[in-house]
Image (spheres, rainbow, N blue to C red):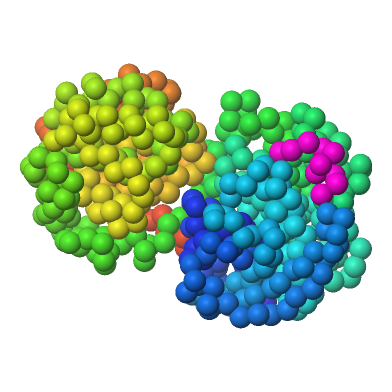
Amino acid sequence: MKKILFVSSEGVPFIKTGGLADVVGSLPKCIDKKYFDVRVFLPKYACMRQEIKDKMKYVTHFYMDFNWKNEYVGVLTAKSDGVTYYFIDSEYYFSGYKPYGDSPLFEIEKFAYFSKAVLSALPLIDFRPDVIHCHDWQTGLVPVYLKERFQGSDFYRGIKCIMTIHNLKFQGKWGVKDVKSITGLSDYFFTSDKLESYKDANLLKGGLVYADAITTVSATYAQEIMTDFYGEGLNGLLSARANDLRGIVNGIDYDEYNPAKDKALKYPFDAVTFRKEKQKNKTALQAELGLSVNPKTMMISIISRLTDQKGLDLVAYMMDELCQDNLQIVVVGTGEERYENMFRHFAWKYPDKVSANIYYSEDLAHRVYASSDAFLMPSLFEPCGLSQLIALRYGTVPIVRETGGLKDTVEPYNEFENKGTGFSFANYNAHEMLYCIRNAERIYYDKKREWNKIVDRAMAEDFSWHKSALKYQEMYDWLIG
């Protein structure tokens, strides 16, 4: 039995702020239990829901030398979907109202503590992993500490590390002097071929240098991050490690996102019944959101964090123009104030055409995925993206920019070969996006049978976790040898 340990700053169902939590919650469940014993380490945040904290059982506690003092480390455990989870408990580090958002320096200190605590706890829980699978900068020090102070003992010798990049934009950077003091790492580690990056210490970089393998969440993003534009200053290092870097596209949980069994939907549907039932969901949603009720009007949805990365400056530029078309636009999400206010403004200006839901509700999101005809995601960059995978599952045709995981998962419609599961455009350009949306409108209104065939193909795609899990298993086998 091969032993795999996931280390992450968030994971469903315990704590979630973004797509990382979905991956860490779904992937371990899908890895073959006959061959792999997969366990997960998370921080025990005070802001976790009480009923979740009530399920945790005390395992052990100890004191660890960290940041010039003896720091308490508690270890708790809980099971979810047959997977064993462990939690690092520290009143001092994890008592905030949300998982992230402290001062950058405290964030670095908090996750340095977490990384060291996980490694220190392993002998006490009697679990020696063959591979430690680390996720994003918050766990970047795990491979570093493993090589720096733990490798000397027999228990840790030969443990391999994988570093997965979910979004290269976030790296965990701060001044060298402070990071050196907090982590207790020697000068040796703070050179430009290790943790130092443009005069700062960079935790993600440390993880990438010391990991035995690097993955990211789609094949195209793996290529993109080796270029200047997408590389966020680490493209040189990633190019140097190109042989150890692979892209494995994320999946989604096909039980949670299943239009045939979705409890949030008034009218569940599948690939056979979508033609009738999707319209019923649409008219119910139009009534609920105060849009003009007409099953024939094309509805486009945006369910997203409202940030620059998601291409919303293109949408802002074209919003007035789009509202001249026979369209409805439904937005769900929160983010930068200027985008929140922009969508509110257009909902006020075109009340029967635009619905701005500037909050996040899982149930509403499910209803919007199920009711819309198309889903707009014109991202500037997109490591993988889960929203377009959910849209495909619900027969909602994605309109995307060809970048990262969007390029890998949405096949552009080709009306001469009757192929494709969505519409896409290449350049980050508002007029190109508008042209692409209008092409989708043309097919929707003038060639309804063609549109329904696109939906058929979209719903036939398989982006469940089981496919991706096989690729991770191959990698674990390759590393363990």
Instruction: Mark yes or no: residue 307 visible.
Output: yes
Q: 199 or 239: nearer the eye?
A: 199
Q: Position of residue 40 (x, y in %)?
A: 62, 67
Q: How many marks?
A: 0
Q: Position of residue 208 (x, y in %)?
A: 73, 45
Question: Residue 41 occupies which quadrant of the picture?
Answer: bottom right
Q: Classify 253 as above or below 329.
A: below
Q: Which quadrant does the C terminus fall into?
A: bottom right
The residue depicted at 75 percent of the width and 64 percent of the height is 117
Q: 97 or 253: nearer the eye?
A: 97
Residue 177 within the segment the image draws in magenta: yes
The residue depicted at 67 percent of the width and 56 percent of the height is 134
The residue depicted at 38 percent of the width and 56 percent of the height is 462
* Left or right position of 137 against 18: right
* Left or right position of 293 against 302: left
Q: Position of residue 27 (x, y in %)?
A: 53, 62
Q: Position of residue 158 (x, y in %)?
A: 82, 64
The residue depicted at 80 percent of the width and 44 percent of the height is 179
Question: Residue 419 occupies which quadrant of the picture?
Answer: top left
Q: 38 or 246: nearer the eye?
A: 38
* Left or right position of 236 against 64: left
Q: Which quadrant does the N terminus fall into?
A: bottom right
Q: Which residues are magenta?
A: 173-182
Question: Residue 28 occupies which quadrant of the picture?
Answer: bottom right
* Left or right position of 427 against 358: right
User: Which SS does the magenta portion mostly show?
Assistant: helix
Residue 39 within the segment the image draws in magenta: no
Instruction: Mark yes or no: residue 467 visible.
Output: no
